[in-house]
Amino acid sequence: MSSTEVGAGLAVDTPPGRVLLASNNAKKLAELRRVVEAAGITGLQVLGLGDVEAYPEPVEDGATFEENALLKAREAVARTGLPALADDSGLAVDALNGMPGVLSARWSGGKGDEANNDLLLAQLADVPAERRGAAFVSVCALVTPGGEDATARGEWRGRIVVERRGAGGFGYDPLFVPDDDLAAGRTSAELSAAEKDSLSHRGKALAKLVPVLRSLAAPDA
């Protein structure tokens, strides 16, 4: 199997024009569709898991974001025969030695976003502002039915605030103030979708995959 960290394109041995996002997260699907549209890519239909026959999602037991993203994308290709894109992302907190990292979604034992945020706030309760640095990390992997893959990594530095703010986004967004917006002090959950796309960890990773996504489009579109 060949592998690359984003090249000019990947060989595809199924009819071009479709790519599957291996996620049930509607906000991630909307984000990928916005990236494709903003890049001016035509002739590429972005599908979600709701558009294909349901299958059991793989256990994310990789030790790194790269491993988890690739295993999800490869499983989607094996189940559907479509080129598939998957991401694995999380929050790396400096004061917690990079945790929760790949365990971000399950930090509270699988109890959901609210419980994850509660636990993080409790763990940082005595940590002063100058030591509350953190980064959102995303690795996106795109795999073709021919077994080729490309990965791209994006990071978004910021800090963790002491209480939730904002109703947008998901996960740890209400607690994360990005360095890009530090003067305004808005959390990721207070940014518009367009602002978040241009700044975020996943937006950066997806932008690196635009040449690969373009190569999947139908040639006559």
Image (cartoon, grey):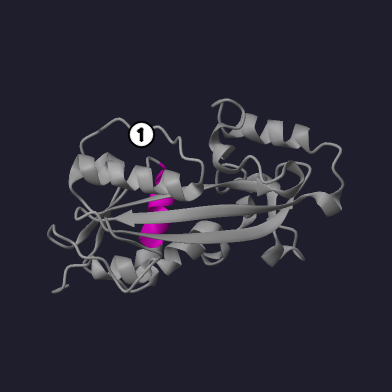
Q: Which residues are magenta?
A: 25-34
Side of 173 relative to 21 (left or right): right
The amino acid type of the residue labelled 1 equals Pro
Between residues 83 and 117, which one lies in front from this camera angle? 83
- Regarding residue 119, the answer to whether it shows in the image is yes
Q: Residue 149, how many percent across, how many down?
A: 31, 58
The residue drawn where x is 71% and y is 44% is: 97
The residue drawn where x is 71% and y is 63% is: 179
Q: Is residue 172 magenta?
A: no
Quarter of the N terminus within the rendering: bottom left
Residue pushed farthest front?
1
Q: Residue 114, how many percent across, how many down?
A: 62, 32
- Indicate the secondary structure of the residue bearing disc 1: loop
**Magenta segment, prevailing SS (helix, strand or loop):** helix
Side of 4 relative to 18 (left or right): right
Is 110 above or below relative to 155?
A: above
Mark 1 closeness class: few <14, some 14–19, many ≥20 residues within 10 Å = few
Between residues 24 and 136, which one lies in front from this camera angle? 136
Q: Is residue 29 magenta?
A: yes
Is 78 above or below relative to 2?
A: above
Q: Residue 185, how many percent across, how many down?
A: 75, 59
The residue drawn where x is 25% and y is 33% is: 54
Is 208 above or below relative to 162?
A: below
The residue drawn where x is 28% and y is 40% is: 50
Q: Residue 90, how many percent across, how many down?
A: 56, 46
Residue tagged 1: 58
Is 206 above or below relative to 96?
A: below
